[in-house]
Image (cartoon, rainbow, N blue to C red):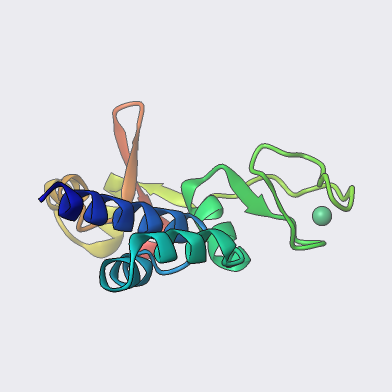
Amino acid sequence: MEIFVLWLFLSIVAGVIASNKGRSGLGFFLLSVILSPLIGIITALVAGSNTSKVEEKQIEAGGSKKCPFCAEIVKSEAKVCRFCGSDLPKQQGPEMISSSDYASAKGIEHSTVLDGLREGRIIGRQIDGEWYVSAKEL
Ligand SMILES: [Zn+2]
């Protein structure tokens, strides 16, 4: 029984290593369960990183952005690219409009918009108690 638990645990470890490298966590997990967690972990460690996937994750997490000049990943607060030395444009998030503007633009009740925001049906963000909707939603 303990062996089985350990086997599963190590298989999960293999999956986590793989997914941190931008590879299929589930795939490596299954490989480990079926063959051996040892093989799974070694394969995951040896496998090269799927760089673009890792970069995507970094950008999604919000800590990084891509330099428009050299396409390297730099910190989102960076003003100058550490790879090519270019001046980086200011971070431009998606444009936000206030929830009431959104409601009138859409011709719907403001309360409906607020409900949608709270329930996640409408993408937006709360800033200082006010709701803002991503202009992409329009
Ligand atoms: Zn650059």
| Residue placed most toward the observer, 75 or 110 | 75
Image side of residue 22 versus residue 111, left or right: right
| Residue placed most toward the observer, 9 or 114 | 9
| Residue placed most toward the observer, 40 or 108 | 40
Residue 37 is situated, as x and y percent measured from the top left of the image, at 35, 61
> In which of the image's four quarters is ligand 1 placed?
bottom right
Number of numbered discs overlaid on the protein picture:
0
Looking at the image, residue 85 lies above or below residue 78: below
Residue positioned most to the right: 85
- Toward which corner of the image does residue 72 lie, by quadrant? bottom right
Any part of residue 7 in sight? yes
Residue positioned most to the left: 1
Q: Residue at x 20, y 58 (%)?
A: 121
- Quarter of the image where the C terminus is located: bottom left
Image side of residue 129 versus residue 83, left or right: left
Residue 52 is situated, as x and y percent measured from the top left of the image, at 60, 67
Q: Residue at x 15, y 50 (%)?
A: 119
Any part of residue 138 in sight? no
Q: Residue at x 81, y 47 (%)?
A: 81
Residue positioned most to the top: 128
Q: Residue at x 31, y 58 (%)?
A: 11
Residue 62 is situated, as x and y percent measured from the top left of the image, at 52, 45
Residue 42 is situated, as x and y percent measured from the top left of the image, at 50, 61
